[in-house]
Amino acid sequence: MMQKSFVARSVQAALTLAVLATTPAIAQDISNDEQGEPAPERIQVTGSRIPQSTNVVSSSPVSQVTAEEFEFSGAVRTEDLVNDLPQVFPGQASTDTNGATGTATVSLRGLGSYRTLALINGRRMVMGSPAQSGIAADLNQIPAALIKNVELLTGGASATYGSDAVAGVVNFIMDDEFEGVKFSYQNSFYQHNNNNNGPAAQANKASGFALPDSSVTDGHMNDYSLIMGANSADGKGNVTVYATYRDIQGITQDQRENSACALAGSPDNWRCSGSATIPDGLWLAGNNAWVHDGADFINYDGRVYNYAPLNYFQRPDTRTTLGGFAKYYVNEHAEFFAEVGYMKDHSLAQIAQSGSFFLDVNFNCSNPLLSEAHYQAMCADRGYGPDDSFSATFAKRNVEGGPRYADLQHISHRLVAGVRGEITRDWTYDLSFNAGDVAYSEMYQNDLSNTAIKRALDIVADPATGEAVCRSALEGLDPSCVPWNVFQPNGITDEQLAYLTLPLYANGETQLREFNVFTVGDLSMSELKSPWAYMGPSILFGYTHRSEALRYQPDSAFQSGDGAGQGGPSVPVNGDLSVDEIYTEIQIPLVTEASFADTMMLDLGYRYSDYSTGIDTDTYKVALGWDVTDTFKIRSSFQSAVRHANIRELFQPQGLNLFDMAEDPCAGANPTASLEACANTGVTAEQYGSIFDNPAGQYNYMQGGNPNLDAEKSETKAIGFVWRPHLANDFDISVDYFDIDVEDAVGIVDPIFSLNQCLETGDATYCDLINRNENGSIWQGAEGYITATNVNIGYLRRTGVDINSNYLVRLSDMGRLKFNLVGTYFMNFDELPQPGSDLIQCAGLWGGSCGGPNPEWQHNLRSTWVTPWDMTLSMNWRYLGGVDHINSDFNLGAENYIDLTAQFSVLSGGQINVGVNNVFDNDAPLVPNQLGDNGNTFPSFYDALGRYFFAGFEYKF
């Protein structure tokens, strides 16, 4: 199905040819006169395939980030820079560990990374990973050193690009016509001063947990890149090749005082929580709970395990990219072009040790390893004799073994080939083939086997020797079984751990094949003109065939759910999806050089899509650009977009996963919900008040695909203006209002929402989704869970205003000052989980169904002084507005970050960059661990690791 080897071999062959073609040409000194005729002054702007004049401002709101911004920010990871933009919210990031896919994704307007279409040079990227939550394009595939600029288009763009462009488009435009050789190197790291007398530190001290050093320096990153490019001898072609390598060291949470334990409580009363899966071992039987305390066996005293220190705050990562771009102009009828890319990314996602996570096991009163205290408490006092056995629940953290970690690797190949040119003087064509593959592998290490735990705790005496043996070994079911001696101090051996340990493996692939052809006609010479314009319309007709495939194959251990620390089975997914599309765009000059309009341009677009699932969709756009004068433009647009369900949403089998919740309202000795309300969720009178809650705040939900999903539908309305007063072109400002509505959103009914609705209303629509096990739990074992499979149920809305402004001040012989402001104000950040439920309004809020912080206002203000002394100094002010908690007074204040950068030109063609981001070492706002993303905060949104220092050198010749 995948044909990965074809694309891989093609990329390898193309890279070899590109290097051979480039190397001898580097030394050639090609004058401007030898480089052929300059290309026409028309470019393709994100949001339309019709080429535009270089001085035209788009009728659709497009924001741009230049390569200069990458240099100023010192960003090593592409997603780090993009995530700092006010329009963008984090997706998968380097700070994710539990549930990390190893990919890097972005989410425009907080609508989800799978609703944000990522492009390279205007062409779709392959799905980033076949793993759960990894289906969006992986920005690790994009070498930051080659990025010329990034364009962000607000709102639906399906008429131009097809499915997925609901929130908008992020288009990475690469430097594909490089000349010469450029080598770059940068080293960067984090430095943080730990406040070991602060509230979080005091919570650690009160719990007896260790604190980090007062000053730490870690997370070192080394980033290398080499770019070579040359024009052909006749000046008609160019080949550019690149190679990059980066090495990023990990940071564990015990290196920051704010993440050294899993916090609970509130800012005026922080305390360290943790997991009841403790190193000492915890037994539950009936309504009783006991814990091993050295050689003693006592009633459970509430102790918990601090699982935070070993969790990664920044994952270690190595990445290699190789690639190239080539083009050759034969004549006006044919210019051939190609792009190839290879990436290998390797990352580790580490969390605390595995263990027995409240597993039901057979307890034998005849177990020869039992002490007298064990036997008395669990057997004699409960009416059991030496020959009896019963079911008990056991929890123990495997601190004798190492931390769990997922060893994640992605290898991607990308190949683009095509030809473009003139058909006639007025008609052009563009024909291309775009192929991409990703090969994924995962090795999950240091987990334990539930089956092995059960057998290793089902201990009896060997009739021949009286020694402790596994019942399964004595009966011949599992001769290799070794008893797990959790009953005696220091009783656990390497032999026992070797038997219990279960490595897990998974692999998979994603694939993209896309054929695209379109033709553009300039009808200026025809009679089809507006009576108020001297230019005729431009029209485009196109056809696309796109096929995508995904295969995710976990091993039998993953599939069975036998991994003790997995939270449930990982199910295989295998599916494909294809679509045939026809599309058109028309650009109509309505008015030119009139008293009321310098120009007025109408842009129309339409796309019809026929999917292999039997679904067909229609999308369209209408945009009007009115240049009132040559300095003031009004623009407005209406776009209809769709997102067809992806392969995982369609075909993923059902299985258990985990969600975070502060508490089960029906658990604990004093439940917060009444017996009557809890009865709605399946709690009996006998269970009420005796259900053991999960101190780690993790609960089960049943996930799964739905092949009958309909396509999501969205409408985007935008209106704004661009003002560029003459002032020597030194000032411009654009202000755009956007309104994005998404209907039939694919998703799940939030398990917390379902539970709360059942408690409050008793409505069977929600109560039928709650499945409690025989103990009343929704987290112990595989029988307790809340059903939350995929449905077309949601409604999402984002409205707000984007502001983008540039100002240049000339300082005569002192150089010049440049200012750039990019800001976004959200008016609505709404979600309706399902018809009939209350609208959840999240602008300026966080927590609960709002998830992470959703500030009303964010901005970046960069000020740059370009001196006349081969030196440039730049300062960036990043502002993240404060947010209130949706359900309480737990509010997070605004954050102000200051970044400083200096650039020095040295030698001839050399440049040194040095800088520090988050100069004042601002701490990220603290939240209870169960409510944050990682480390008691939202580290992909806030600067949670401290100051970021970087120093780099590049040399071009």
Image (cartoon, rainbow, N blue to C red):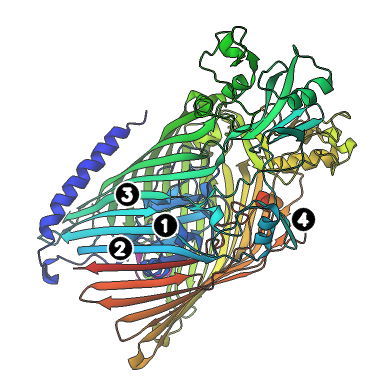
Amino acid residing under circle 4: Asn
Q: Residue tagged by mark 3? A: 320
Looking at the rendering, the stretch of residues picked out in magenta corresponds to 49-57
Q: How many marks?
A: 4
Give the mark, 4 or 2, whose residue is nearer the N terminus: 2
Q: Secondary structure at mark 2?
A: strand
Q: Residue tagged by mark 2? A: 185
Is there a contact, CB below 8 Å, between mark 1 and mark 3? no
Q: Residue tagged by mark 1? A: 77
Give the mark, 2 or 3, whose residue is nearer the N terminus: 2
Indicate the quadrant containing the C terminus: top left, top right, bottom left or bottom right. bottom left
Amino acid residing under circle 1: Arg
Could you say which is closer to the camera, residue 607 or residue 258?
Answer: 258
Estimate the x, y position of residue 605 in percent, counting from the top left.
46, 53
Q: CA distance from mark 4 to mark 2?
A: 48 Å
Q: Secondary structure at mark 3?
A: strand
Q: Residues within 10 Å of mark 1 (few under 14, many from 20)?
A: many
Amino acid residing under circle 2: Tyr
Estimate the x, y position of residue 590 in percent, counting from the top left.
45, 67
Left or right, 110 with reference to 725? right
Of badges 1 and 2, the one in the foreground is 2
Q: Is residue 346 magenta?
A: no
Of badges 4 and 3, the one in the foreground is 3
Estimate the x, y position of residue 103 in percent, counting from the top left.
45, 47
Give the mark, 4 or 1, whose residue is nearer the N terminus: 1
Q: Residue tagged by mark 4? A: 887
Indicate the quadrant containing the N terminus: top left, top right, bottom left or bottom right. top left
Q: Residues within 10 Å of mark 4 (few under 14, many from 20)?
A: few
Q: Secondary structure at mark 1?
A: loop
* Residue at image coords 78%, 33%: 767
In which image quadrant can residue 870 be found? bottom left
Q: CA distance from mark 1 to mark 3?
A: 12 Å
